[in-house]
Amino acid sequence: MSLVTFHEVVKKYDTVPSVNHLSLAIGAGEIFGLLGPNGAGKSTSIHMLAGLLDIDGGDIKVDGYSVRSHALEVKKRIGLVPQELAIYDSLSAAENVTFFARLYGLRGRLLRERVSEALEFVGLQDKAGSKPSTFSGGMKRRLNIACAIMHQPKLIIMDEPTVGIDPQSRNHILESVRTLNKLGSTIIYTSHYMEEVEAICTRVGIMDRGKLIVSGTKEELRRQIGSEEKLVLEVDRTDPAASAEIRQHPRIKSFTELEANSFEAVLDESATALQDLLFILQKHQVGLRKLTRVEQDLETLFLQLTGRTLRDRTS
Amino acid sequence: MYAWLTMAWFELIRFVRMKSVIALMFLLPLLLIFLLGNAFREEMKPVKVAVHLADEDALGTMIRSYLQDKETADYMVATEVSTEDEAREQVRNGTADFGVVIPTGFSARVMAGDEAAWNVYPGRDDNRNIMAESVLQRLLTQIEVRQTAAAVLGANSAGLPQENDVPRALPGIKTEHVGGGKDPFGSVTAIQYYAGAYLIMFLLYSGMSGILSLINERELGTIGRLYGTPHPIWLLVLGKLTGFGLFAVLQAMAIIGFSWLVYGVQWGGSPFLMILVCLLTSASAVGLSAIIASFVRTSKATLNMFSVLTIFMTFLSGGMVADLSGTIRRIGDFTINHWATVTIRRIMDNGDMDHIWQGIGVLAAIAAVLMFIGAMRLKKVVRLHA
């Protein structure tokens, strides 16, 4: 059963659509990774989901409640970990969590218990009384998470929660995401770090230019790119005639020079394409020194679908 | 309610923990009042008055004995001069702080119930003038008692007032300001005047801080998280502003308490009205700063513009220089500071309640208009600083 559904959602800035008829369903218990380069529309989408931005068209429902008509009911069910550090330097770690917990209606003993649990969960129990200004970047990020989970929301939205932190804190956060999911929360995780999404997400959606261009489990997405094979070849010399013949071959999709005597070839799924490639090299007396098969990942799929890389900041 | 109180309480905590805020909002006004109070205290040595007493009748003798009285000498050293010109010259060249001339026939006019007047020559120092006038006011009261007695008892041979012998309307005794200016502080003392002006100026600053805090939430990124909580944004903003309202009350209490304890500044007998004026001033500042913030792009620009405006308004309303000339003073009548300080001075002076409520009414109208426009522009404020 879907916990979150986007139905034909549109968001425009002036007349330019930032999110363009987005439809998407996220099931309860999933860790859904939302991928895309900067400007793809993923932050806008989750801001509309969290009720921070008005929706220009379509609707989003969370646990059966419409964001447009029951925004406050939706907000009760959401814990938002924003991309920016949304914490107060003048309040201690415990006070930060307490402040937001009280805004979610927690009080008395339950409030104290939940604050303590949240700080323990992110490994800041010992720093409860310390001000964030004395924290490292990673500790601040963890406190940022604690402020979003203490009310035990059904849906946790994490907008690039690992930006600019050390590997140790990153691992801690990724492990926290898994644990929160095991404890029953559905997670929406946005990132443009492909490896993070591949490591923790059960399902992935890729956005570009305001549209969801593909979604599915990691295996489903891999199957979409499984029909191609990418190879890196190192040869003893570069022969223009051989290169030209290879490029004209109907089953060899591309043949690109990476550096001197090194090429990348993308072949179609047929086994004969590789045999033909080796034959042409032999015919032109080009010796093959090394042949490496490149593992196809989601980054490749994204590149294939959009012609851009995930971290293309000019997009 | 719980969310509103949470916002207010944590806003107050955050605000009072900022060292710069404590320095600017609490210590600076107290320091200014301290320096000002000390300056006025040093000037409390007896005022030198040149007196030309041309009236040698009954009241002339009474005036002379009053001026030579030991109790009067604690506040005023009176030197008799032979002519009015000499009195005026002594004030002009600074030998005397103040001059007073009692003309010939003064006693006769007073006792006859006719209009009588004496001439005064205020000196260059406003505070010395106030001091001299205060001492002379006591003398004037005694003379008016005599005048009343003469009016009542003079018509009654038994020497006792009869049922129908209500004193006729007396023309009173006029004090003619011949040279110098009028008392710039009105009916309050100089320290009362400036303490009131500073209170209003710093309340305006703390009111502005409410809007700056909202902009800072945006710059910090916490506004998104606050939007994300299950409460309407107006409730959260109201909570924030309530926190600043509480802070304004604390600030007012500190300024009022300090000036009262250290310099005995009297703030009148209506603490409720005083708090009301403080809150209306803060509310006006919130509205005004929201309007400014909706036109400029950064919190720093808002701070700078509002600070300049506050200083201008304080100046124009006479909060920095009490004795402003007519045109500037008239422009000052259109400032928040003017209505707030005038009302505060009326409360300090335990003045007429109608006038006090009139001042509060105008201030409430200013606050309501500014808050309304500020509320209309609030979305713009948040977006501009996004």
Image: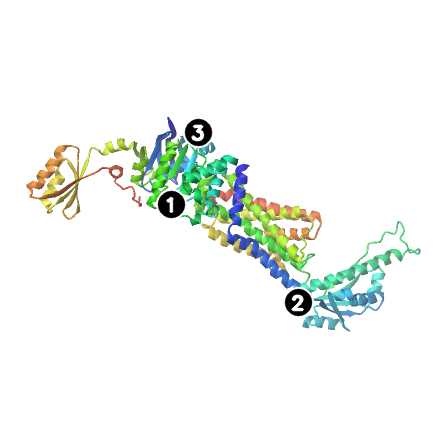
Disc number placed over residue A138 in the picture, else none: 1
The residue at the far top in this view is: A1
Kindly identify which residue carries mark 3: A65
The residue at the far right in this view is: B158
Q: CA distance from mark 3 to mark 2?
A: 76 Å
> Tags 1 and 3 in contact by the CB under 8 Å rule?
no
Q: Amino acid at mark 3?
A: Tyr
Which marked residue is nearer to the observer: mark 2 or mark 1?
A: 1
- The chain that hosts pointer 3 is A
- On screen, residue B283 versus residue A39, left or right, reads right
Q: CA distance from mark 1 to mark 3?
A: 34 Å
- The chain that hosts pointer 2 is B
Disc number placed over residue B158 in the picture, else none: none
Q: Position of residue B10 (x, y in %)?
A: 52, 44
Within 10 Å of disc 1 (Cα), the crowding (few <14, some 14-19, many 20+) is many
- On screen, residue A300 versus residue A183, left or right, reads left
Q: Amino acid at mark 2?
A: Arg
- The chain that hosts pointer 1 is A
Kindly identify which residue carries mark 2: B124
Q: Is residue B312 visible?
A: no
- On screen, residue A163 versus residue B71, left or right, reads left
Q: CA distance from mark 2 to mark 1?
A: 67 Å
Q: Position of residue B272 (x, y in %)?
A: 66, 46
Q: Position of residue B347 (x, y in %)?
A: 68, 50
Within 10 Å of disc 2 (Cα), the crowding (few <14, some 14-19, many 20+) is some
Q: Kindly indicate the quadrant of the structure image that contains residue B323.
A: bottom right
Q: Amino acid at mark 1?
A: Gly
